[in-house]
Amino acid sequence: MIPYRLYLVFLGLVLALPIFSQTYIGLKGGVNQSKANFIFDINPSTIISSSDLLGYHFSVPLEIELNEMVNFLPEVAIISEGTIFSAQIKEEQRTYNNTITYLKFPIMGKLKLLKKKYYEFGIVGGVVPAVALDVSSFYFTSLDWSRTVDLPLDFADAGIKRFDLAVSFGLNTEKAIAKGLKIMLDVRYNLGMINIGKHTNLTNTTESFSLTVGLLTPLFNKQKIVRL
């Protein structure tokens, strides 16, 4: 677990940087395709197949210009991840949909590879601390595809600790669309760790791809035009 003092230091830096730098704030949303291999009360020998879960990504990003080539990209995000798998239970085949909802704090940096007056393109990378907010599961059977069964499930039942840490990297592009406004597109690959705490000492990994679109506006009106 990361000591709370480090969170306070990071929060202080995030609050102080916009005073000295050109800073943007915005809203961002998109989809998150993930596979998280947490499975509860299911014998592995009964599992037939597994596939990715299509979830969501909503966030409030900041973009802080450190210099002409590097930006700092902290973010607060609500993201869903999980997995879909099929299992043979007695005489029926069940398809489970397992989902974890996270509050994530991506701490990213951006290196600008291409920089024009109204357009820029770069690579991003960093770490993503996260706290799990909710875990849920439902299934449907091959005998009745229209009927879903919700399972009473919490973190203790699933054997999942609530803290998660991931690394993330990807591509980012931005374009000025009006005075002071920028539109951004992010594509990221995320590799994280789910701590399995109840039934085993193992730590499972999760992986996901996210595609998001956002709109940014200056936090302070230091400049009348967009400077890319």
Image: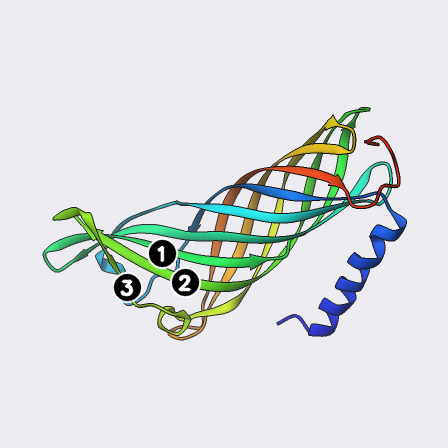
Tell me the SS state at disc 3: loop
Contact check, label 2 and label 3, Cβ < 8 Å: no
Residue 217 position, x and y percent, is 74, 39
Contact check, label 3 and label 1, Cβ < 8 Å: no
Name which of mark 1 and mark 2 comes first in the sequence.
Answer: 1
Residue at label 2? 135
The amino acid beneath tag 1 is: Asn
Where 59 sits versus 138, above or below? Answer: above
Residue at label 1? 98
Q: Residue at x 84, y 30 (%)?
A: 225
Tell me the SS state at disc 2: strand
Name which of mark 3 and mark 1 comes first in the sequence.
Answer: 1
In which quadrant is the C terminus drawn? top right
Label 1 to label 2, Cα distance in Å?
8 Å
Numbered mark located on residue 151 in the image: 3
Q: Residues within 10 Å of mark 3 (few under 14, many from 20)?
A: few
Where 31 sits versus 165, above or below? Answer: above
Residues 4 and 190: in front is 4
Q: Residue at x 41, y 70 (%)?
A: 155
Where 170 sits versus 46, above or below? Answer: above
The amino acid beneath tag 2 is: Val
Relative side of 36 to 188, left or right: left
Which of the two discs, 3 and 1, sits closer to the camera? Answer: 3
Residues 215 and 157: in front is 215
Tell me the SS state at disc 1: strand
Q: Residue at x 45, y 52 (%)?
A: 81
Residue 124 position, x and y percent, is 68, 41
- Residue sitting farthest toward the left: 91
Contact check, label 1 and label 2, Cβ < 8 Å: yes
Label 2 to label 3, Cα distance in Å?
10 Å
Residue 140 position, x and y percent, is 22, 52
Label 3 to label 1, Cα distance in Å?
10 Å
